[in-house]
Amino acid sequence: MTHLTTERIRNVGLFGHGHSGKTMLAEAMLFSMGVTTRMGKIEDGSTVSDFNKQEAERQMSITASLLRGTFKDYIVNIVDAPGFSDFIGEVYSSLRAVDLALLVVDASTGHDIGHSRAFAMAADLHLPRMFFVSKLDREHVKWDEALDGLREEFGDRVLPLEFPVNPGLSFNTIASALTMKAYHYADDGSGKWTEHPLSAEAKGKAEALRAKLMEAAAEADDALLEKYFENGELSAEEFERGLRLGIAKGTFFPVLCGAGARNIGTHQLLDFLVGYASSPLNRPPVVAKAAGSGQDVPLVADSNKPFAGLVFKTTAEAHVGEQSFIRIFSGKVIAGTDLQNPNMSKSEKIGQIFHMCGKNRMPADVLVCGDIGVLVKLRSTRTGDTLCDPRQPVQFPDIVFPAPVLEVAVVPKNKGDEDKVASGINALRAEDPSFTLVQDAELSQMVLKGQGDLHLNNILAKLQERFNVAADLIEPKVPFRETIRASADAEGKHKKQTGGRGQFGVVWVKLEPKGRGEGYEFVDAIVGGAIPGKFIPAVDKGVQDATTRGVVAGYPVVDVKVTLYDGKFHEVDSSEMAFKIAGRLGFRNAFKKCKPTILEPIYDLTVRVPEEYMGDVMGDLSSRRGKIQGMEAESRYQVIRAKVPQKELYRYATALRSMSQGRGMAQQAFSHYEEVPPEIQQKLMAEFVEEKEEE
C-alpha cells in the first residue's frame, strides 16, 4: 500500500486453549492474503508464527508472534498468542496491542478454560470479542454442542453468523446468515471457493440466525432499535451498521467457523474482519496518565497528535539486538525521532523501524497511529514501557501479569556460576515479566517463580542458548519455623579462663509462647543490678542470634517472649561478648524444655476445574494433607478452596494439568503457619542432627 491510513488497519489477536487451531488459522490467513505461497505445518516446524527453536521442537506456540498481511487494501495485523497456560503472560501483553480478541475453539472439544481467561481479560480491557470454531473437518465434531457450550459459558449474546453445512471428514461448505449464500471450498487447501444458493434446510436455519442478528444489530443503537420496532426490520445498510456497532460495543459476540489446516472459511473470516471489525479509529479513546501529575489523558487515534505507544513485547535476537514490539495509540513515529520513556525516566532515539511477519522483518519508513511495528536497539525500554512525545509525556497503565503458580530452586551446573545465572535470568525477565527470580537469603537459594514447568524450562533453555550458562531446577527448601508450646526457664553460663583476662557471664531467662504471628519480644526484668545495664543489649543480641539459627531443626524461632530476670557478672572478666554467648546458651537451654514444635507455611489454594475432574482433584488434595474449605459452581466449572501445606504444593500446577487434561487452573497465596504433623517433625529434627554431625 502506498499510503497507509489508520482506518484501514485491523489488529486482531488469536487466543484460546493449546491445540485449538490458532496457529494453523493464522497460517491460512497469511496464505489467503498472499503473504506465503504455501501453508506450513506444525509437525515439520514450517509455520510462520512458530519459528523459534523451542517452538519447532515442542510443536507448540511459546511466544506471541506478530504477523502481517494485506486484504482488499486493508492491513491485517495478527497477534498469534500461545494457548498453554505456562505462557499466559504472552496473552496478557498481546491483549494490550489488539483491537479485537478472536477466540479460536476446537469443534471437537469445545471451549476451555483458556478461552474463559482470555475472554475475561479482553472484557476488562473493553475489547470486542468473537469466536472462530475451527477443526470442523475432524471426526466426531459437534458444532451444535460447541455452540451450546459457548452460550452456556459466555451467555446468549454469542451469535453465529454462519454454520457448517457438512461438518466432519467431508467438510467443505459453509452457509452464511449475512449473505444468505453457501460457500463451497476446494479440497486442495487452496482456499478457493464457489458461491451457491442455500438448500431449503440450510435456508431455514440461516433465516432464523439472521432474525437474531437483526435484533442484535437493532439493540446496538437506540435509533436503530426504534426503527426496528416501527418497521419490523432494518435496511441492508442499517443492518450492517448495527452489526458493526454491536461488535464494537460488545453487545454481542459473533461466531464464524471453518478449518484452518484445510483453509476453509478463512476468506469469510478476512472479509468479516475488514468489513465489520473495529478499526483503531472506532475504539474509545485509550486513557493514559500524564507523567508527573497522574491526571487522565484520553488519547484519540490520530496520526497528527503527539506520539504515544505501548511496548507490549520485547525480544532479543542475534545480529539484531533487542526488538521492541510497539502498538501506536496516538501520533506517528519515523526514524531519528527522539522519544521519552517515562517508566525509566530516559530518552530514546529511534533508529530502524520494521514491520514484522513471524521472523521476517520488513523495513518501514513510518509507523502511523493504530499500527503495530518493531523498534530496534532501544537502550532502556522494556516490556510494558510507554514511549511518548517529550512535549506531552504520558504513561499507559502497567501490564499486570498473573501471579506465578510454580516455584523451583535454580542451581548452576558449574560451581561458581551463581552470578552468571542470576544476571542472565534477570536479563531474560526484561522480555518476560511473568516470572520472577528471588534471592532467598534465609534458605540460601535462588528461587525461580513462573507459570509452569514448560515456562521455567524454556527460561533455562534461553539461558543456555544466549548466555552459555547451564542450570538445573530442584525442589526449593521450605521456610519452616520453630516455636514453643509451654513456658520454662534456664540458666545460660559462659565462663572461660585462658591465662589472662577471662570471660564470665551468667543469665537466667524465662521463655513463654506468644500468639501465632506476634513475633519476638525481649523483656528486661533485672532488679538490683544483678547484671549491669550496659550488658543487657548483648544478652538480647545473643538470644536473637539463637532465634535466627534455630534450636531443634535449624529453622528460625518465632512467637516467643524472653524475660531476662537474673544473672551474675564479674567486675573484671565480664564483657558484652560473654553475655551475648550466655544469652544464646540460656535461650537454647530453656527452649528445649518448652515443648518445642515446628511450624510450616500453609497456603490458600483455589482450584477451578470442570466438574468431571472434581473427584480426582479432591482425592489428590487429600493426599497432599489439604483441608477443603468449600466448593461452589461457576458455570461448567467447580471452584474448590482448600488450605494446603507449601511442602505439598511443589509442582502442583503440573499435576493439576495432568489430572484435568490441561483444563484446570489453580491460584495460591500464603495464609498462615501451623504445626507440622509429629512424624514429619521427627524427620526434620533427625535430618538436622545428621547435618550437624557431618559438619
Image (cartoon, rainbow, N blue to C red):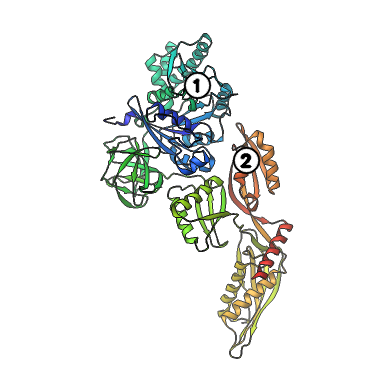
Relative vertical location of residue 636 with respect to residue 335 in this rendering, above or below: above
- Amino acid under label 2? Ser
Relative vertical location of residue 376 with respect to residue 223 in this rendering, above or below: below
Report x, y in % for residue 673: 64, 55
At a point 26% along the width and 36% down the height, the residue shown is 304
Location of the C terminus by quadrant is: bottom right
Q: Position of 551 compared to 369: left or right?
A: right
Report x, y in % for residue 199: 50, 10
At a point 59% along the width and 56% down the height, the residue shown is 476
> In this figure, which residue is indicated by the disc labeled 2?
658
* Camera-side residue of 205 and 538: 205
Q: Secondary structure at mark 2?
A: helix
Report whether residue 128 is seen: no
- Amino acid under label 1? Pro
Gap in Å between the C-alphas at discs 2 and 1? 33 Å
Disc 2 vs disc 1: which is toward the camera? 2
* Camera-side residue of 41 and 620: 41
Q: Position of 143 compared to 244: left or right?
A: right
Of the residues under marks 2 and 1, which one precedes in the sequence? 1
Q: Residue furthest top?
A: 200
| Structural crowding at the residue carrying mark 2, measured as other residues with C-alpha within 10 Å and reported as few (<14), some (14–19) or many (≥20) | few
Report x, y in % for residue 46: 45, 35
* Camera-side residue of 560 and 446: 446
Report whether residue 366 is seen: yes
* Camera-side residue of 637 and 579: 637
> In this figure, which residue is indicated by the disc labeled 1?
160
Report x, y in % for residue 508: 67, 76
